[in-house]
Image: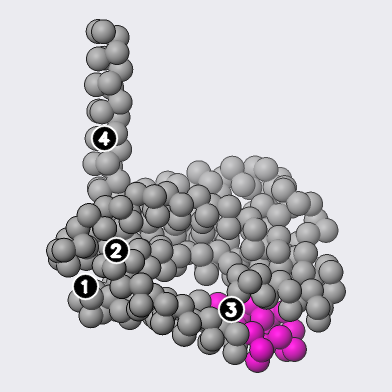
Amino acid sequence: MYGNIRQFAIGKIYSASDLAFYNRGKSIPNVIVRNVNTSIDSVLFPVMSSKQDSRSEVKKITRKAIMLSNYVMAPLMMGMASMADAIVKILLTEKWMPCVLYLRIFCVIYMFQPIHTSNTNAIKSMGRGDLLFKVEVIKKTVGLIMLALSINCGMKAIIYCYLVNNIFDQIVNSWPNRRLLNYKYLEQMKDIFPASALAVTMGVCVYCISFLNLNVYVTVLLQIVAGVSIYCIGSIVLKLEAYYQLLDMGKGYFKKAGKEKRDVHHY
């Protein structure tokens, strides 16, 4: 109910087109976020639960999960935000251009989703459902108050308040782990700052390509190539920890797959 309450309020007070633009702007980045979060939940929570007797191990896993998932999520969201105009034109046509603002704001919101997911999983893995319940009550209460304050101030006020509310939710989600794992919110932000800053820089560079006034398909192609190149080169230059962790994971996966293939062939 809470997840859909903004759509319900917008539908009651504003026009059907306002609601449609809001929903479209939310749904496009949400497809990526939902898949990434599902992957994190399915892998992270069982591992954390098996290590719940060791706080240092849970903190180590949580930190790695936040850094890796942010390293993947940040460029995807910033890239999508910078390419929002072209994406909407190609996927939805010109008549849906008003949803570009919502798409960009939701990209910023979802960019920090790994902090929500990883902190929540850490709390659950430590068997502290009581703390999780209190956290959710606080978040939902503040969210409803902010919605009530912004609902009659226009669609932009609603979406910007949602962004501020999301920042508040991040802090509240991480608060229990300040004591449970000795992993403070500022420490988490410090861990994701290098990748996030690189993703924002990449996004600005990619956005500048749109001023070349090229064909929309050519623009998207150039933006994707430029974005991937800038992010990968920047990761190497900055020696980002998450980049090398992903490389090691990829090498391990292909090595394992190759071994299994050879074993099947030999058999």
Is residue 184 shown to the viewer in this render? Answer: no
The residue carrying mark 1 is: 181
Q: Which comes sooner in the sequence, label 4 or label 3?
A: 3
Q: Secondary structure at mark 4?
A: helix
Q: Amino acid at mark 3?
A: Tyr
Q: Which comes sooner in the sequence, label 2 or label 3?
A: 2
How far, Cα to Cα, is label 4 from label 3? 40 Å
Give the camera-side residue of 18 and 2. Answer: 2
Residue 177 lies left or right of residue 202; in this view the side is left
Which mark, residue 165? none
Magenta-highlighted stretch: main secondary structure? helix
Q: Which comes sooner in the sequence, label 4 or label 1?
A: 1
Crowd band around label 1 with a 10 angstrom C-alpha radius: few (<14), some (14–19), many (20+): some
The residue carrying mark 2 is: 125
**Nearer to us: label 2 or label 3:** 2
Q: Are marks 4 and 2 in contact (CB under 8 Å)?
A: no
Which mark, residue 162? 3
Give the camera-side residue of 191 and 42. Answer: 42
The residue carrying mark 4 is: 251
**Nearer to us: label 4 or label 1:** 1
Q: Is residue 82 rendered magenta in the image? A: no
Q: Is residue 148 rendered magenta in the image? A: yes
Total marks in image: 4
Q: Is residue 233 above or below residue 151?
A: above
